[in-house]
């Protein structure tokens, strides 16, 4: 049986140039779960839009922090010692090297800010 990481549709090309208007809600409405689109580049970081549903897997990013901000739904991020539960309007930064396991409780729309070099499937 395949895992979400195996079927995660990730496109890393930047969709919006600096100064371009973005309708993030409209873009998210047209995406299926386990889709990740790079919206914009800000210095050496990117802003990504993820539509998630269900469990991902334990993973980490050796060299990059990862910021999650929930727009819709609920995202629980399991850490080795606790669970961080995020509702719309809430966020958390997972530091580089920390194992984490995202659990999207139903369809969940998330903005992620991370270095452009991050592999969204984990290291």
Image (cartoon, rainbow, N blue to C red):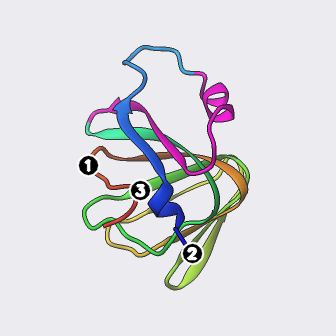
Q: Is residue 68 above or below residue 85?
A: above
Residue 95 image offset from top left, x and y in percent: 38, 65
Residue 90 image offset from top left, x and y in percent: 64, 52
Per the image, the residue denoted by label 1 is 117
User: Which comes before the other along the chain, label 1 or label 3?
Assistant: 3
Q: Quadrant of residue 30?
A: top right
Q: Residue at x 52, y 68 (%)?
A: 2
Left or right of 114 in this view: 105: right
Per the image, the residue denoted by label 3 is 66
Per the image, the residue denoted by label 2 is 78
Residue 27 magenta: yes
Q: Residues within 10 Å of mark 2 (few under 14, many from 20)?
A: some
Left or right of 35 in this view: 19: left
* Disc 3 to disc 2, C-alpha distance: 14 Å
Please give the range of residues in magenta: 23-43
Q: Secondary structure at mark 2?
A: strand
Residue 54 image offset from top left, x and y in percent: 66, 64
Q: Residue at x 41, y 76 (%)?
A: 99
């Amino acid at each position: 049986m395949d895992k979400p990481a195996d079927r995660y549709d990730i496109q890393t090309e930047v969709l919006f140039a600096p100064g371009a208007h973005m309708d993030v809600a409209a873009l998210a409405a047209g995406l299926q779960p386990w889709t990740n689109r790079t919206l914009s580049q800000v210095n050496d970081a990117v802003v990504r839009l993820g539509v998630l549903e269900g469990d991902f897997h334990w993973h980490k990013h050796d060299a990059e922090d990862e910021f999650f901000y929930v727009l819709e739904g609920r995202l629980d991020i399991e850490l080795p010692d606790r669970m961080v539960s995020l509702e719309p309007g809430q966020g958390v930064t997972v530091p580089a090297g920390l194992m984490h396991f995202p659990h999207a409780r139903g369809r969940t729309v998330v903005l992620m800010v991370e270095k452009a070099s991050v592999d969204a499937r984990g290291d």
